Amino acid sequence: MSVSPATPERVFAQFLGLERQARKAASTEQLAFAMVNDGQALFGFRHAALLIAGKVRALTGVSVVEPHAPFVAFVERAVGALHKQNRLDESHNVDPAQLGEQIRLDMNALSAPHAYWLPLKNRSGDIFGGLWLARDRPFDDAEHALLAQLADTYAHAWLALQPRKSWRLRWPRKKLLAVAAALCLLLLIPVRQSVLAPAEVVPLGGRVVAAPLDGVIAEFLVKPNQRVAAGDLLVRFDATSLKAQADVAERALDVAEAELKANSQRAFVDAESSARLDLLAARVEQKRAERDYAQQLLARSEVRAEREGIAVFADAERLTGKPIQTGERLMQIADPNRAELRIELPVGDAIALQPGAEVALFLDSDPLHRHTARLERAAYEAQSTAAGQLAYRLDAAFIAASPRIGLRGTAKLFGDRAPLAYYLLRRPLAAARQSLGL
């Protein structure tokens, strides 16, 4: 024995003390510390390592195990070699020569000359861990017997401190089957399909104000959501070049008319002047048409409202001073009391929707208040949104008073009824179909 001289009574007392310490452990951490440290006085090992499921959990004299430490890696490799040789089931003195040359060299450099493997088994006899004990001399037969008994004590204490199985796993099989059947029936309950999509309150029947010519906007004379009357000036384009063109066209018309008048007076005595009258008259008409077109362009430089309503646009600063092309949208004149809901339903969230389907709108500015609407139109073709996402455009009419135009929120669209399982698994099934091609 490691303690010399030692009487059998003293050895037995120390052994009982080890068992008592194991039973007094309140957690697996305390038990692991006792397993690798308390037996040192009785067995005289230089160091001990506790392995659970092939990984070192505790070391002699170490409070925190470093997983990548050289000694830890050596012990795990040595136990792995024993596992490959099917030598983990029984306790025995470890022969380093049978574990490979590299493990033998590591054992000489990192461990003691003699090692002992002590397996820990559960009630079914399966190994769940073990102790690696190393010292300067081999373990004798008497120590083998004590270590085997101590291994049973340690294994029993360790299993007692492990968390019990979940109550769900301890249910009787009949009860588990009953619960599974109830869940299956629950998944068959029909529920209304629904989907969420971004939405915006837009004008209903509004008049679009587009750019009448190519040019640069000088100023906006109205503000967003400002009420305007028919004939009010909305936008003024930069008319410098248009005024110059109109002035040049007017002067060119005056020159053409003067030349026609002079040739008309000489036509009585000059045959050549008489022959040029038709040409000069046509030129006058051409210059008059150019003058009229230039004046029309100049008149278009001021955009006026064609109807009464409010001016719906985002920001005047975004367009002021920038070149605009003919037909480009500037704003919309709408009746503030007439609005509809425009919804952008992503392609991945699309469900079967019928005209008249219920729509609930929750505004970002008032998420607790619900606005009810009915679906009126749904596009057949998906288009790219401002966020670069493919979505279907849907239009819905408000049942009660509509919110203010321009407000945004989230619309919840309700479809037909379907089993709860389909409602929950619709998106995963679609993703699996797209990924696997089913």
Image: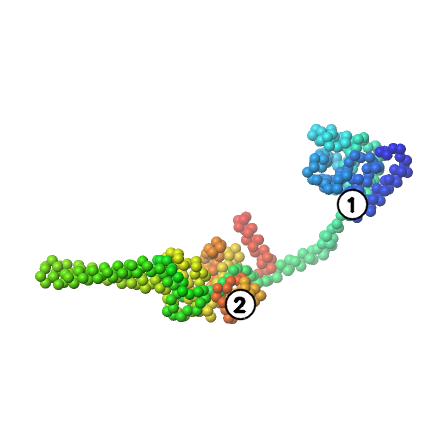
Q: Mark 1 to mark 2: distance in Å?
A: 63 Å
**Residue type (three-letter) at the residue carrying disc 1:** Gln
Q: Percent x, y for residue 22?
A: 82, 44
Q: Percent x, y for residue 103?
A: 71, 31
355 horizontally vs 122: left or right: left
Which residue occupies the foreground of this view, 88 or 142? 142
Q: Can residue 84 be seen in this view?
A: no
Q: Are marks 1 and 2 in contact (CB under 8 Å)?
A: no
* CA neighbours of label 2 inside 10 A, class few (<14), some (14 to 19), many (20+): some
Image disc number at residue 30: 1
Q: Looking at the image, which residue is at 69% across and 55% down? A: 177
Q: In which quarter of the image is residue 227?
A: bottom left
Q: Looking at the image, which residue is at 77% across and 30% down? A: 113
Q: Quadrant of residue 257?
A: bottom left
Visual colour scheme: rainbow
101 horizontally vs 276: left or right: right
**Residue type (three-letter) at the residue carrying disc 2:** Thr
Q: Percent x, y for residue 318?
A: 43, 58
Q: Looking at the image, which residue is at 17% across and 60% down? A: 259
According to the image, label 2 marks what residue? 372
* CA neighbours of label 1 inside 10 A, class few (<14), some (14 to 19), many (20+): few
Query: Which comes sooner in the sequence, label 1 or label 2?
Result: 1
Q: Nearer the viewer, mark 1 or mark 2?
A: 1
Which residue occupies the foreground of this view, 195 or 352? 195
Image: 267 above or below 150: below
Which residue occupies the foreground of this view, 378 or 63? 63
Work out which quarter of the rendered image holds the N terminus and state it.
top right
Q: Looking at the image, which residue is at 47% across and 70% down? A: 337
Image disc number at residue 227: none
Q: Is residue 280 visible?
A: yes
Image: 422 above or below 399: above
